[in-house]
Image (spheres, rainbow, N blue to C red):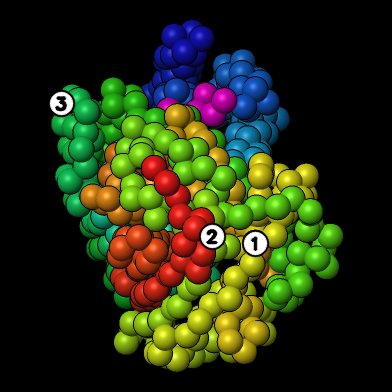
Amino acid sequence: MLKRNNLISAVCFIGFIAAEAPHISAAEALVLLSVLFFVPGVFPLVFHQTDDRTDHTFENVLLQCYPAAALSAVLAFITDISFFALLWWLYTILLAMYGVVRLWKTNIHRIEETSVIFGLIYLAGGGFWFFAYVSEMDIMHFGPLIILLTAVHFHYSAFLIPIFNGLLGRIIREKRVRYGWSTGIILLSPLLIAMGITFSKTLDLFAVGMYMAALYINAYLVFRAPFQTKAGKLLIRTSSAVLMITICFSLIYSLGVYREEMTLTISQMIWIHGTVNACGVILPALAGWRVENPKPFDEHCVQTFSRIYGKRTIGNDFLADIHAVTNDHYTGLIDEMKDLHSDHFSAEKLTPSILSFYEQTINYDIEAKVTWSAWFRPFARIYERFSRRTGQIHLSMNPDWYVMHGEIKGVDSSKDGRKKVRAWIRTNEKQETIFTALYSVNRSNGEGYMNISLPLPFSQMTGILKPYHHKESLMLTSRRRKSGAGDEGIYLQTKLGTYSLPLSETFLITAQGENRLTAVHRMWLFGVAFLTVNYRITCSNPNSLYKS
């Protein structure tokens, strides 16, 4: 099908050149170059990235309809009949709808996949401006050339740069914070630039400057990325290097508009920023990513999340209030630690007291000491007032040790959606609820994870923790592996979807003799440490200790 589409595209482009010669519009040719070659060129990188059959059906419809839509775009320029332009616009709307459906149905909204899908959504803007140009619409008194160049903008930078940026995000394992910030700017820039052109020269200059900075960060990441093929690396890095030069002309042009001293004409920008970008940036980048063909991080991962959302307040009686408590009796946070078995973890290597704590948690007394990082303490004081009212994740500002009282209750799995769910409810000496945490275990691709849900007001936060050995100690962490594989992470789930949070946490549990343990819980925000909780854990019933 792809070979057929490529052949049809080539014939259509030749037909356009023949029909329009010798007075060929460079801007029209640029639009058609994207419509006929770059749009179908990204299909293998965007389609069939999920196992959802409905998605595949939608994708097949889009592939089947593409030749007619592409031919309509060519006929629109040749005949100036707006009906043909409308057909291309409707096709881009279908692509955008497909992107919205993907966003809506995806389990985890990873920023790189969001970037890919935003490219499809922005293309619908290109379809609109294409239709506006052919139908000679009067939009805010813009001239035909400005409307056409806006169509070029949405068929290139607004459409393709987010997709290429998303593909980059699939392969980089480090510098994720930088990648996140640059991606956010890249996704917002098309809107900001459009608003700047329409309403404010100052905003336009600011938006172009921010976009340029984001693309330079993107280029830095490209030159640090671990490509799998030499050809892909050469093509993509060449594309990025050329873009670093051509984007400077955009800033020069915007600065000239702002100062009302034109340093570059629109005709010059069409050739410098249009033709050079098409041939020197988009073409090698597309070829390089087709060679590299990166797959999504979560291509084969199956995350499971609780369906229990919090109300305005949580507290000790929350589960009873929503009739989610059962008579199931659980003694520990997990039935058997061997349920977490994987190539990276074997329960037999842990000391018996650690196994006993997780399987017989009710037999242990816990003391905790909370330490906030100095930079975060002002925020922690504000947060404490909020957490006291909601009765969830209520960590004290008191730097002293204090006793945590805990009880374990069975949770209705039909309400929660996970299996063998139990709630560990912890309170302090003032009978204030510290945590209401719903524990379960999920397995994905042969690996076991501790799956901990904390109901929040009208939402819930889930920590999916991967177990590792640390000598004879146990480490549970939400930090993703450098390979990008696995389900681990901290996620916020709302009615609108599930989002990966810029939080990470690690628990290190160590035996201190037969009946005593220590644990250290550390948390990071955007990679910066902000919380440490130390625990002293003592067995109150030595006869219950796990025997190996």
The residue type indicated by label 2 comes to Thr
Closer to the chain start, of discs 2 and 1, is: 2
Q: Could you tell me if the residues under marks 2 and 1 are in contact, i.e. CB atoms within 8 Å?
A: yes
Q: Is residue 96 in view from this perspective?
A: no
Taken as a whole, is the magenta stretch helix, strand or loop? loop
Residue that mark 1 sits on? 408
Closer to the chain start, of discs 2 and 3, is: 3
- Judged left or right of residue 306, residue 372 is left
Mark 3–mark 1 Cα distance, whole angstroms, equals 55 Å
Q: Which mark is residue 479?
A: none
The residue type indicated by label 1 comes to Ile
In percent of width and height, residue 364 lies at 50, 66
Residue at 39% x, 30% y: name it.
295
In percent of width and height, residue 293 lies at 34, 26
Closer to the chain start, of discs 3 and 1, is: 3
Q: Could you tell me if the residues under marks 3 and 1 are in contact, i.e. CB atoms within 8 Å?
A: no
Q: Is residue 2 in view from this perspective?
A: yes
Residue that mark 3 sits on? 230
